[in-house]
Image: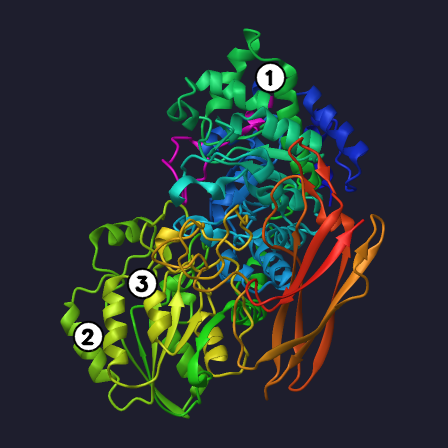
Amino acid sequence: MNFFKTTLTAAVVVGLGLTACSTDKSNDMDSFVSDLMGKMTLEEKIGQTNLPVGGDFTTGAPMDSPIGELAAAGRMGGTFNLTGEKIYALQRVAVEESRLHIPLLIGMDVIHGYRTVFPIPFGLSASWDTTAVERMARISAVEASAVGINWTFSPMVDITRDPRWGRVAEGNGEDPYLGSKLGAAYIRGYQGDLTRPDEILACVKHFALYGAAEAGRDYNTVDMSRQRMYNEYLAPYKATVDAGVATVMTSFNLVDGIPATANKWLVDDLLRKQWGFTGMVVTDYASINEMTSHGLGEQKENAIRALKAGTDMDMCSDAFIGQLKEAVEKGEVSEELVDRACRKVLEAKYRAGLFDDPYKFSDTTRIAKYTLTPEHRAAAREIAAETFVLLKNEGNVLPLAAKGKIAIVGPLGNNRDNMMGTWSANGVGNECVSVFEGFKNYVGDKAEVVYAKGSNIDAGDRIEQGSQAYGGAMRDPRSEAEMLAEALQTVRGADVIVAAVGETNGMSGEGSSLTNITLPETQRKLLKALLATGKPVVMLNFSGRPTVMDWESENIPAILNVWFPGTEAGNAIADVVFGKVNPSGKLTMSMPRTVGQIPVYYNHMNTGRPNDSGDFHAFSSCYMDVPNSPLYPFGYGLSYTTFSYSDFTLDNDKLTKDGKIAASVKVTNNGSVAGTEIVQFYTRDMAASLARPVKELKYFERISLAPGESKVVTFDITADRLAFYNADGETVVEPGAFKVMAGPNSRDVETLDFTLE
Ligand code: NOJ
């Protein structure tokens, strides 16, 4: 359908003299946008660069923007985080009441599902399953686009090495290679080729380095060398650019001392010139105004700085709209820069197909048809089960038999609201399946399932307040003693206890940093009391980050990390706990032994005085009190079966610059049930011109094996896979000695040597 022919009156069509072409060829887009811009006043062009918040939920101070008036006056290019019918109404105002009838971008933080909520992104990353992530993103786009959303602020691909940072929950963990693969999968899922009415614009964030906030405190300073940026942090952003992401969001933090939003090197030189990004750049929430707090002076200078740096759209600072007209008129900034920004916004709309049909995403009949459908719920259940990581299973406590009496205890055991995790878009807590419900659904009348809460999440008011602020409060007014007594009464006669413990939704995500990431004391006390009954205890750990679980891993026989699984939480957990699905997830961030070790990550440098022994050795790089290694390493996760690795071979131990070596390993399922294993290959450069990490993930494959079955997995090593950014700022491949490693996680690997000639 062509919007200008079918939706508007003939007078409007004549007035505009424009028709959008339904093909996305860049020539057509250029001339369409040029024609349109030729009709725009300076104010209207600046209007396109303005992105006020819709107001249904915000992450900062709600702006005082009358968005209806702005839309009618052509003084905004879009809005975000608006829900329901308001979206359609606002789009109608822009399209029918504004002088040039330019449709709006309608954004939202749809980061792990819209109404059907999938596991948090960090949980999704633990599946190491790009197909699952793409499917999740596709379903998110289908549901979100039905209500008129045409732009999602996802994926977040910031590398995260500090689990105190609450936004770990939104990312893919600590590895740049895995983060790149998953980042690209999100883009494919959301955008497709941006032709269908259920394909929406993606926005990769937060450019750049936001995950490296000092001490894990949100919005804090970031400072790092160029070589670290290039070699360890930038790859996932680049991968999404290569995958065709339509928009990029700048980050709140400093990069080289300059806020990312005003950093010309970052946005203009690196993103646009070096990487060839041709899409639109939006600031993060009020980040132009935040430059004043960073110490960069007043709004006007900062609006100019942001525009000059290459940002196109101002989210919630009212700075472009408030300052740029005067700045242009006074000659403080050139109109060409305003034109560039406006053009990028219009091009994003063009790519989304909004000029063909501004209501392309507002076919309200699709809402009922495509929202929270049984198929979407089934996908959420299946995908959630893939994300759980079995950390411990002593004595094969798991899987449980669906018989006897099963006691679920813990503050998260019969709770729907806290199954979704952070930023759950339009998810409805009450539509989630709790653990208690999921277990009852699963066992039917084959077993008795009972529940007691047992404890509050935490005893501290501060965490409770924080949880409340971020929508996850659940304090029970009863005393600790009362709750514990009830729990101990409930577990009487039970064959097994399943303890559902961890964090609330609000304890991870934006603004939810913690210094203490152990299980809160109230819950540890509960676990101790449950263990003291002598019954087998299975711990389900809900969390948006790695948890310090030194005591738990020492004492609890079985631990399943379930993150925040989403709408189908209880059903998916039951599928895994009762063995219908064999767990296959693997950690994407190292689990520290103690907070004092942070940052602890697998791809660290060796130092000149390495200490891998786990013991204290004087004058080596180690702590006196704990080993350097994490409690559970990156890539770790168990299964109900066991896999053995054998016959690790290289077909050659010399690699030429244009050649390849095949590194192969045989993986066998030695158990009696089918299982899925994530086979991992790492390399290490032994003779480079600068220090390189002790291991870098270079390849992985998810393979499913029947009992007794074997498969050979091959990683083709080519020279380009060994490239890195050197001290002179060049990407180089340096000859010399290398190691290649294969194994089930980053710790338990076998190693072979080869040389690059
Ligand atoms: C601030 C967050 O940092 C960003 O991730 C989000 O997309 C925006 N707010 C919009 O909600």
Q: Residue at x 61, y 36 (%)?
A: 103
Inspect the image, locate mark 1, and give the three-letter code of the amino acid beneath it.
Leu
Nearer the N terminus, badge 1 or badge 3? 1
Residue 73 seen by the camera: no
Query: Quick check: marks 2 and 3 in contact, CB under 8 Å?
Result: no
Q: Residue at x 27, y 67 (%)?
A: 523
Q: Residues within 10 Å of mark 1 (few under 14, many from 20)?
A: some
Inspect the image, locate mark 3, and give the three-letter code of the amino acid beneath it.
Leu
Describe the element under mark 2 as helix, strand or loop: helix
Task: In the displayed orientation, state which residue is furthest to the front.
Answer: 618
Q: Residue at x 61, y 20 (%)?
A: 338
The residues colored magenta run 45-66
On screen, residue 90 versus residue 503, left or right, reads: right
Q: Mark 1 points at which residue?
A: 42
Q: Residue at x 42, y 30 (%)?
A: 65
Inspect the image, locate mark 2, and give the three-letter code of the amino acid beneath it.
Leu
Q: Is residue 47 magenta?
A: yes
Q: Mark 3 points at which residue?
A: 519
Q: How crowded is mark 3: few (under 14 residues within 10 Å), some or many (20 or more)?
A: many
Find the distance from the CA under tag 1 to the CA under tag 3.
Answer: 56 Å
Describe the element under mark 3 as helix, strand or loop: loop
Nearer the N terminus, badge 1 or badge 2? 1
Looking at the image, residue 29 lies above or below residue 577: above
Q: Is residue 159 magenta?
A: no
Q: Name the residue under label 2.
A: 484
Residue 267 seen by the camera: yes
Nearer the N terminus, badge 2 or badge 3? 2
Q: Where is residue 209 in the image (x, y as percent from the top left)?
A: 52, 39
